[in-house]
Image (spheres, helix red, strand yellow):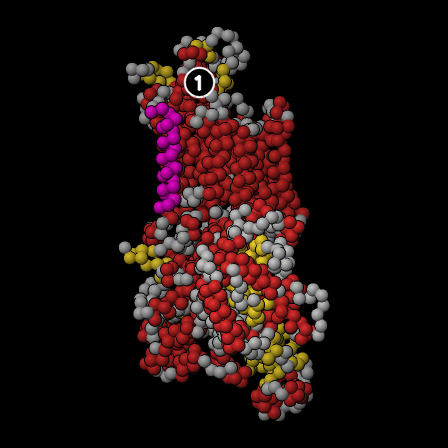
Amino acid sequence: MNASELQPIEQFLQTHAPFDALPDDVISRCAREITIGYYAKASAFVEFDPINPKLYLVRSGAFEVRDPQGVLVDRVAEGECFGFSTLLSGEKVVNKVAILEDGLIYHLPHTLFSELRSHHRQFDTFFTRAFAQRLRNEHKFKAKDHTTTSRITNMMAHQPVSIEKHANVCEAAKLMRDNRVSSVLVLDNNQLVGIVTDRDLRNRVLAEGIGGEAVVESVMTKHPQSIAPNALVFEAMLLMSEHNIHHLPVVENNQARGMVTSTDILRSQSSQPLLLIGEIDRQDSIEKLIHVSKQIPVLLQNLISADARAEEIGRILTSVTDALTRRLIVLNQQLLGKAPMAFCWLAFGSQGRQDQVACSDQDNGLLLAEEPDEFAAAYFDKLSHAVCKGLDLCGYIYCPGEIMAQNPKWRMPLKKWQNKFSQWVSAPDPKALMHASIFFDMRAVYGPHSLFDELQSTVLDQTKDNDIFLAGMTANALQQTPPLGFFRKFVLERDGSEVKGMDLKHKGSALINDIGRIYALSAGIKEVNTAKRIRLLMDANIINRKDALNLADAHEFIAHMRLANQGYQANNNLTVSNYLMPQHLSSLLRHQLRDAFKVVHDAQSGLKLKFMRSF
Amino acid sequence: MISDSWLKARFRLDALILKYKLKSIPRSVINPERLIEYQQSLLSQFSKSINEAQLMAIDLEMTGLNPTEDQIISMGIVPITQAGIPLQQAQHLMISIDGSVGSSATIHGIVDNQLENALSLEQAVLWFLEHTKGHILVAHHAPMDVSFLLNYIEKVFGFRMLMPFIDTLGIEKKRYLRQHGQLIKGCVRLGESRERYHLPVYAGHNALLDAIACAELLLAQVAAMGGGHQMKCYELIETIK
Amino acid sequence: MDVQTLTYIIVGATFALYIGIAIWSRAGSTKEFYVAGGGVPPVMNGMATAADWMSAASFISLAGIVSFVGYDGSVYLMGWTGGYVLLALCMAPYLRKFGKFTVPDFIGDRYYSQTARTVAVICAIFICFTYIAGQMRGVGVVFSRFLEVEVDTGVYIGMCVVFFYAVLGGMKGITYTQVAQYCVLIFAFMVPAIFISVMMTGHIFPQIGFGAELIDAAGNGTGVYLLDKLDGLSAELGFSQYTEGSKSMIDVFFITGALMFGTAGLPHVIVRFFTVPKVKDARLSAGWALVFIAIMYTTVPALAAFSRVNMIETINGPESTGVAYETAPQWIKNWEKTGLITWDDKNNDGNIYYAKGEENEMKIDRDIMVLATPEIADLPAWVIALVAAGGLAAALSTSAGLLLVISTSVSHDLLKKNLMPDISDKEELKYARIAAALGVVMAGYFGINPPGFVAAVVAIAFGLAAASLFPAIIMGIFSKTVNKEGAIAGMLTGLTFTAAYIIYFKFVNPSANVSDNWFLGISPEGFGMVGMFINFAVAFAVSKVTAAVPQDVVDMVESIRFPQGAGEAQDH
């Protein structure tokens, strides 16, 4: 039998990616290994053989890949493939393939597919890319399904009912009646300036005896709380319960985009993290708080098994920590009395960045409005010790580096904090830089925002465009590199003879946090969450769009791997750590992890070039 | 359509006749028993569904169209199992002929010197029996191909036997008539038939490719008629002797 | 073992050392070491700065130029040393306070103008190109001698080595690699100097030997002082007296000025002052660097004088009539292979003879002096090999720094910030590498077709820096009135005038390059200082007639003139 006899089939392979990258002799082998099948529209869906998974190459006809919920994942026509997800991941087929048009399909056996992947790089890359693309599509969908991780956009009322600020109350009431809504947004030149609710009409108009001809402006709630369209639903709930409101305008770029009400949210069923936060807010003693906090590890496990995005898991867990911290402060203030001056409870490090995971230690400090006298000093000493101890008992162990509010060193008035930061900025020695990586990711968990903003803006003024400081930061950040050796091989850490694996935190996530921080400080960006930093930097054109998207993907992927690995360790009674053994991964995940590390490596090179002027 | 049991009965009868004939003919080098064995191996397929049955698409290239005078030049076979066509088991065979390929060479592109390594008539028949044993033959315009094969068998063994087969052209004719009422010249040729099922056009023309093309056509036809799960083999089988 | 084998071994060993340090400093354990030790100690940083500072020009050509032109050569010593002091004391602290890593960034921010930044970038690139060309020539000389090839081939080899070192190697810019390079180069420079000093004057320190009397073979004083002997020899052979210059006072003054101010404007050294986190440590390391630079610079005049005497005596023989070519010392024959020494037997007596004017039969390239000295003085072969390694160390440390400035300026300042804002990190890096490659190639071209000696080429770079960047920096720090229009106009006129003057006399009309034709008797090498004055004048004049400096910039300038940061004052 000579090769040319199957020539039309070989020719077909030769002209379609990724087979076009294969040498001729391999093509003839492929042609020999093909089993041809025919799929008629009458049978609606392609039946998959669960025992012998295959690669499906469409010779003629048209097909659609849909996920179990029926959402379109991919459309496949002549020369394109499906079925590779199962081959790559080894998981059972969950997607359905609908037959749109009768067609002939060439089946390639699993063994051949694996062999081609291992011998032909381009072939391999083609499918892992296609698979990654699909994963991304699926992720978009998954977020919608999960209440805690779903976004405001998905549930808000688009085209909110609105009225000009000079209209009178009567018109507003009519508008609300006609549209059967309980609130109306007040606009001035299309900018949101206020909100009028049923309650306002009752309390500020009727009860005050004001007539219907009064202008809306005079009775509205000015500068109402609002939320961004891509915020999480549960963040909206938090905001509502914090301010005791039921209506939240959805605002983007100062433009009203929609409206969310507490009813909307109630309708989208309550969920665990919210229940937990609600529970925390209800506890009236520290002992009870400690008891409630036992649920946090369970929450994490649930979130991991629900396959939530790592970024969102971090934000949810941090919200819980924030709530716990706030509650501890409130409860202790009930014991100690009112504070002698305004103060902010600052969260640093992972809590600041909103990417807390299991077994985080506490990194916090206290920002005081002014220099405390003896009485005030004693008061804050007691308060901070009590809160830090409470956190420790709730599972947030004391910071080994003593970066805590109970340490007098990190309990300072605004002036001293400002000096401390400018010292770090002007003399970036290694210790200062080590501190910088923790302290520059700061967020106020409790206290007046104006006080915190004052600190943050003076700090950012100093770091912005301060090349010498940034060069120092960069040099420090580049001390750690992703665990890739020559020829992109994974480098495993060892402890004596014992192989520990790859440190996904210190040689993965932390590096991306460093990169995000340096760029953010250089641009004077206030945001501290790494994913948001990257997004803002991309929007501001400081990081190239492609680089930013890659970096954000890598950040999510590495964090996800770390969480998944910890979930695996917990389920198998192993010590929970940041170390991952690559042999526990499928070849696809290994490949993707390698790509993610490569992205980090490239981003580090970019950082070095930009801020250290070297390569 | 003939029913399953009627079909089987006919074959049993044919086998009896063959066995009777065997006694009267002299023992040759080639054991004629294998012909009966071959025939018996097919019986179990009749009652299976199309998807489960062992089918073998076949196509012959001949020097002409007359089964008694013309010769087979090449033969392509490919099995059809579980509604799939495994190309790994596809085979292509050259058969040596008396004289030259002649004018037909222009059709199938086989030139004399390509036939140098070809099998002799006797070897070819044995090869065919060995490789298609237990498989129902499928061909486009099958009666002609099967007639050629039976003639060859007779030349080797000295007698003919009853052969079952599935004819895609026959199936297509019936389906076309049911849909359109009357046939148009050339409308059930392999290429035209395939087009109606959105099957790709294969550039090239040899026994193996045509066998594959025919196998694909059968899958398409079966799918169009409600799928190979329900349809039984005997519903499509015809016979010839 | 012969010299060549030894050279391979020693050069190889030094490279192994650099690579070893690079690997060691990349290993994870250094982080703890680094944090625990509070960073690099000032002494080490001083050495690293000195290695950045001392180029192939300092190492290879400085002694040569002093040796050949005597007193006039001292302008380089004075200019460079002065420039370093100026840089370390008057500029670095302020720039640091300003928080700017590179000179163009400072200028861009201080003059609130992207145009000013771009002009400064172009000036910096131009200066670096010129400077690096000098390095290439130096490396070429080293390779040509020790691989016994033509000097051009030596430059090609040098180009490859420098390119791989700068673009591919992970060795550059690491403080401890630089420290090692300093150690190699200073050792290589001092060993032959000490050897010769001991042999000729009996003093271990060449600096003392320089002013001492010569001794004879038995070790007894001859009563003749080295410089007297040299003056005598020079007079005898028709040269001007060694200790008296041929240049006019004004020329010497201007050349020294140009070198000094140009040095202060050089972009690659200033970065070193910022890699030290604490201001106090930065000052200390600047001081140490001065000490380490001084070790070499004070040896230069001594080495120059020793080698001059030695050379003349070996060529002309004890009777000053020349020696027969057949019996000529081996080093002359060795260097003839490189084309850097040529002998033209004008009077056909078969003798080689060195003198000024018509009688001279030897053409000797100045750049070989340091490299040839150990051979002339018949020192052991390993000393000769060591000098090669030293020259290479000097060239590598400086050219890597310069190539980084060129390549990152092109990719980041020109492309990313101006022309192609959308390029990705990877592309930026690619362009940086391409720019480095182009830099090496162009520098190599000028190294092969030099418009002058290494030191002279470098002097031009300094002149250009003095005329363009230096005034802009100084006015940026010390003036509140100079605005962006003034700075841009000043830089452009300064650079243009100086470049035009140099190009005219050095390339367009070299025959006219004599003091009679010079403006006020100032040579092209010294014209940078004139350019500087033009720059100042234009800048102030233009600033007067254009919009005033914005208030926030005025505040900024005021704040950086305080010697220390507010935060720091409280802490230390």
Residue A299: quarter of image:
bottom left
The C terminus of chain B lies in quadrant: bottom right
Q: Is residue C104 visible?
A: no
Question: Residue at horizontal 62%, vertical 22%?
Answer: C511
At label 1, counting other C-alpha atoms closer than 10 Å, the crowd grade (few under 14, some 14-19, many 20 or more) is some
- The spot of residue A115 in percent (x, y) is 45, 56
Q: Please state the total of marks drawn on the protein image.
A: 1
Residue A332 on the magenta segment: no
Residue that label 1 marks: C333
What range of the chain is rendered magenta? Answer: C1-24
The N terminus of chain B lies in quadrant: bottom right
Name the side, left or right, on which C325 lies relative to C558.
left
Q: Is residue C324 visible?
A: yes
Question: Residue at horizontal 51%, vertical 77%?
Answer: B5
- The spot of residue A613 in percent (x, y) is 49, 48
Task: Report the residue that reaches farthest toward the left.
Answer: A496
- Reply above or below: B57 against C36: below
Chain under numbered label 1: C
- Reply above or below: A368 against C531: below
Q: Nearer the viewer, residue A604 or B111?
A: B111
Which amino acid does the dot numbered 1 rest on?
Answer: Lys
- The spot of residue A573 in percent (x, y) is 31, 70
| Magenta stretch, overall SS | helix
Residue C5 on the magenta segment: yes
